[in-house]
Image (cartoon, rainbow, N blue to C red):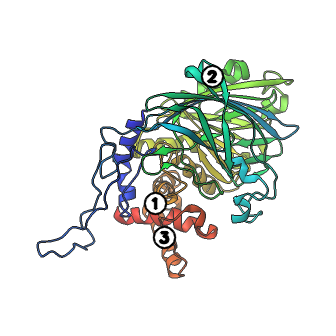
């Protein structure tokens, strides 16, 4: 999906989600340019009195060449482009990762750029980081006193359109953001090619966004990700503290993950070398699952017990994936994974989980398939080739084509988390909103659409209206206790104990009331 098509989806399908709160939307990776809009003026009736009625016309700002007043793309709308080739090597003995990247960054803006900003978010786990001061070490978003951080081995620009000499770039790191001065100015319409290598120790508890549990690894925020450059604010360089999530450019990715041969890897994108890393039986099972709405066991308990789950058991294997028009790539790996799959209209729905989670996770692939079906039928067809639910230490986190969830003894609770994280594939993964500043937009809209999915899967727990009434009661209680906080507030300033009520449920209730 092109950036212009993605922006149209955002402006049409999801416009009401943000205008419902009286806030002008800024969907996509923002539009562009340096043209600023003047504030809208209130509507007046014939007597000159401002219209303050409940259904007064929405005051939209005047549009410009890049976006309309409603936030829909204008004739000169643009987004930057960030295409990555990524390589990761997992060192299970050292519990560390080594990475390499080639980035082709295309400047679609009307501005000449002299530097790029990057997110180096493993630095949140350094001693004396901002994260360590904002969130207690033992809290959900705390670093648990782990000493980590990104270590840059080299960061170069490859001249002559990626075919010439390499020139080391001057870097300046400020917490979780890093400025890289370009060797040559990047003019509008041109592309800079960068090459880098880095390494870091993998935290056990990565602020509930990534981490490890025994031999299982979930890797996110694992490579230097270029910050968004947009017309509203130029470079968006808000630091990563833990509670506020992400705002990223879109691009095409290739990913190579080298792991011990006994490991199974799940990742963003489509697997490119199945015949190298899977057994012939597993390849056939994946093909079967791609045509079935019933669950197919790709790697079964018997396969793990008999040692037939892997083509070979010694040395390493490299898994290769590719993804188009996504804003991030993540992966998970474990030698204990059971792997199930199903499909909806050819879209594979995977579930990877350890045997200890089988009681409820045996249904996770079907939960993922049903979620894709529900949201595709009700909102917009899922545009990617697969969706993956991964069991591990992360309690609930979404990334392109990947939903990370913890084990649960309750099937209703597990489905609520699975369908919530998969709902995020629509907002923000397609829409591309700025989660680090406007958390309520994606979390609130997603919580709203979850009520339909939950009611469809388990009607015995209440229909959609019953679930909506429960949310209204929660918000009413929240407000009556005088702990209410504004919707439009930086996520890292929200009381973590009231995050769900403020950033998730309140917006959902607003949409329920409008409906």
Q: Residue furthest left?
A: 46
Q: Which residue is mark 2?
A: 272
Q: Nearer the viewer, residue 406 or 104?
A: 104
Give the structural element (helix, strand or loop) at label 3.
loop
Quadrant of the rendered image containing residue 48: bottom left
Between the residue at mark 3 and the residue at mark 1, the CA separation in whole angstroms equals 29 Å
Give the structural element (helix, strand or loop) at label 1.
loop
In the depicted structure, whether residue 97 falls above or below residue 214: above
Q: Are marks 3 and 1 in contact (CB under 8 Å)?
A: no
In the depicted structure, whether residue 193 falls above or below residue 337: above
Between the residue at mark 2 and the residue at mark 3, the CA separation in whole angstroms equals 46 Å
Of callouts 2 and 3, which one flags the residue occurring earlier in the amino acid sequence?
Answer: 2
The x, y position of residue 494, in whole percent, is 58, 67
Q: Quadrant of the C terminus?
A: bottom left
Give the structural element (helix, strand or loop) at label 2.
loop
Of callouts 2 and 1, which one flags the residue occurring earlier in the amino acid sequence?
Answer: 2
Q: Residue furthest bottom?
A: 481
Q: Which mark is residue 173?
A: none
Q: Nearer the viewer, residue 379 or 22?
A: 22
Q: Badge 2: how crowded within 10 Å, few (<14), some, or many (20+)?
A: some
Q: Nearer the viewer, residue 135 or 79?
A: 79
The x, y position of residue 49, in whole percent, is 18, 76
Q: Nearer the viewer, residue 411 or 253?
A: 253
Q: Which mark is residue 486?
A: 3
Q: Quadrant of the N terminus?
A: top left
The x, y position of residue 402, in whole percent, is 61, 41
Q: Which residue is mark 1?
A: 463
Q: Nearer the viewer, mark 2 or mark 1?
A: 2
Q: Badge 3: how crowded within 10 Å, few (<14), some, or many (20+)?
A: few
The x, y position of residue 269, in whole percent, is 59, 31
Between the residue at mark 2 and the residue at mark 1, the CA separation in whole angstroms equals 41 Å
Q: Is residue 59 visible?
A: yes
């Amino acid at each position: 999906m092109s950036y212009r098509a993605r922006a149209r989806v955002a402006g049409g399908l999801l416009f009401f989600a943000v205008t419902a709160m009286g806030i002008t939307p800024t969907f996509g990776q923002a539009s562009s340019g340096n043209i600023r809009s003047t504030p809208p003026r209130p509507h007046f009736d014939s007597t000159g009195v401002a219209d303050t009625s409940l259904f007064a016309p929405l005051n939209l700002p005047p549009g410009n060449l890049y976006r309309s007043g409603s936030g829909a793309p204008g004739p000169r709308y643009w987004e930057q482009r960030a295409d990555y080739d990524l390589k990761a090597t997992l060192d299970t003995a050292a519990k560390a990762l080594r990475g390499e990247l080639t980035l082709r960054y295309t400047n679609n803006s009307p501005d000449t750029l002299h530097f790029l900003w990057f997110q180096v978010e493993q630095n949140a786990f350094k001693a004396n980081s901002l994260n360590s001061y904002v969130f207690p070490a033992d809290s959900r978003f705390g670093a648990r006193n782990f000493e980590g951080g990104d270590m840059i081995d080299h960061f170069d620009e490859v001249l002559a359109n990626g075919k010439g000499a390499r020139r080391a770039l001057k870097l300046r790191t400020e917490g979780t953001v890093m400025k890289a001065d370009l060797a040559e100015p990047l003019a509008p319409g041109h592309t800079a090619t960068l090459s880098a290598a880095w390494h870091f120790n993998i935290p056990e508890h990565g602020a509930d966004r990534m981490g490890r549990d025994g031999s299982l690894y979930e890797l996110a925020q694992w490579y230097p990700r270029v910050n968004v450059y947009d017309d509203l604010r130029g470079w968006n360089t808000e630091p990563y503290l833990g509670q506020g999530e992400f705002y990223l450019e879109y691009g095409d990715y290739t990913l190579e993950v080298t792991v011990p041969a006994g490991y199974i890897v799940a990742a963003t994108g489509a697997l490119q070398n199945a015949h190298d890393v899977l057994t012939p039986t597993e390849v056939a099972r994946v093909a079967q699952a791609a045509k079935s709405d019933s669950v197919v066991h790709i790697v079964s308990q018997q396969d793990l017990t008999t040692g037939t789950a892997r083509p070979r058991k010694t040395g390493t294997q490299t898994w290769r994936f590719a993804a188009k028009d996504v804003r991030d790539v993540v992966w998970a790996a474990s030698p204990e994974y059971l792997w199930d799959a199903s499909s909806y209209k050819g879209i594979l729905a995977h579930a990877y989980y350890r045997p200890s989670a089988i009681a409820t996770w045996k249904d996770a692939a079907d939960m993922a398939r049903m979620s894709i079906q529900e949201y595709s039928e009700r909102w917009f067809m899922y545009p990617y080739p697969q969706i993956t639910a991964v069991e591990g230490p992360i309690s609930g986190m979404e990334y392109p084509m990947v939903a990370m969830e913890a084990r649960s003894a309750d099937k209703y609770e597990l489905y609520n988390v699975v369908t919530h994280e998969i709902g995020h594939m629509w907002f923000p993964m397609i829409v591309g909103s700025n989660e680090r500043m406007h958390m309520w937009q994606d979390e609130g809209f997603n919580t709203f659409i979850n009520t339909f999915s939950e009611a469809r899967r388990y009607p015995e727990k209440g229909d959609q209206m019953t679930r909506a009434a429960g949310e209204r009661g929660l918000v009413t209680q929240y407000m009556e206790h005088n702990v209410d906080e504004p919707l439009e507030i930086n996520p890292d300033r929200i009381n973590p104990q009231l995050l769900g009520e403020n950033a998730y449920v309140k917006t959902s209730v607003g949409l329920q009331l409008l409906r």
